[in-house]
Image (cartoon, rainbow, N blue to C red):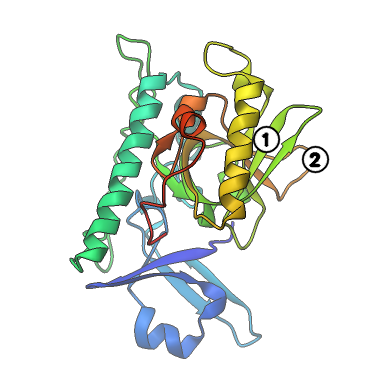
Amino acid sequence: MKIEWAYYENGDDTEEVYYEHLDKDLYESKYQEHLYCISDECDAMIKFTHRKNGVKFFSTWNGQGDLHDIECPYFLKDKGEVERKNILHQIESAPVTDEHIINTILNKSKKLKEKEKRKKQNTRIMTRRTLQGKQTSQPEKIDNGEIDQFGSSSIRIFSLDSKHITPDYVGYRKCVFGKIRHVYFHETDGYVYLNLDNAQYRVSIYLPQAFYADPEKTTKSALVSFVDIIKQELHVHKELVIICVGMIQFKKGSQQDVNIHVINPSHLLINDMKYYEIITNSSVSSNPYNYL
């Protein structure tokens, strides 16, 4: 699997790096030993290779494949693969309550706003990239899919920027965040696509008919109102950042287009506003995460 992006950190200097933008000299002079997996949950270091024939690529630093989080598609696969598959199956199939999902989304929104606040105050953004050089610790398997007394699993739902979603993440449940670029509503079949920011793949939030199957949660007419408001806000060039939780799947008939399936209106926020807040106000507040 090809690693598309890496995260550069060196003191207060941070940025997201795409391998096509590097060459051997730039990598060795600035980025070497300062690149990490793009996932906040991983501590694995990334290295860049530029071959004589012009081929460029990222790969995991030697000996650090098991420092990716176990949910990361770049986690070392030649050690304990059977165990990893069993753990991932438990994670993705475990029941999760709406309360757990909603809290995950609200916490992510809070963290993004805090990051924006620190940027405005010009204070250092603390990250988990605290280890340097070779690392030998093993990942903590906290996501064991165990069920609590309320019938919900105790798993963490990790977050992922829409810009970094690739087909490698298909089959994972994630908290996805990203800018909405376009909205499409299929009037006949009654489903919605919210296209997200991603330069490499077509990535969309998919709201199927199941989204409004329970009239106590929402209706098709309410969804139509929601879509009209989103279209209106995009038309006036307002930045809309969605945070949602859903399963990542291929679009039907494609092995490149990726959808995040959201089947409950409470499982999304746009600019820190809930689904029915948007419908009631007939508008969306300004983007509170301007650094995105």
Report x, y in % for residue 224.
Answer: 65, 30
Q: Secondary structure at mark 1?
A: strand
* Residue at point 30%, 50% (across, down): 113
| Crowd tier of the residue under label 1, counting other residues whose Cα lies within 10 Å: few below 14, some 14–19, many 20 or above | many
Report x, y in % for residue 87.
Answer: 44, 30
Count of numbered circles in the view: 2
Question: Label 1 sits on what residue type?
Answer: Val
Q: Which residue is mark 2?
A: 253
Q: Dividing the picture into quarters, in which one does residue 32 lie?
A: bottom left
Question: Label 2 sits on what residue type?
Answer: Gly
Q: Nearer the viewer, mark 1 or mark 2?
A: 1
Of 49 and 29, which appears nearest the observer?
29
| Crowd tier of the residue under label 2, counting other residues whose Cα lies within 10 Å: few below 14, some 14–19, many 20 or above | few
Q: CA distance from mark 1 to mark 2?
A: 17 Å
Q: Dividing the picture into quarters, in which one does residue 14 lie?
A: bottom left
Residue 89, relative to residue 61: is it above or below?
A: above
* Residue at point 25%, 65% (across, down): 120
State which quarter of the image contains the C terminus: bottom left
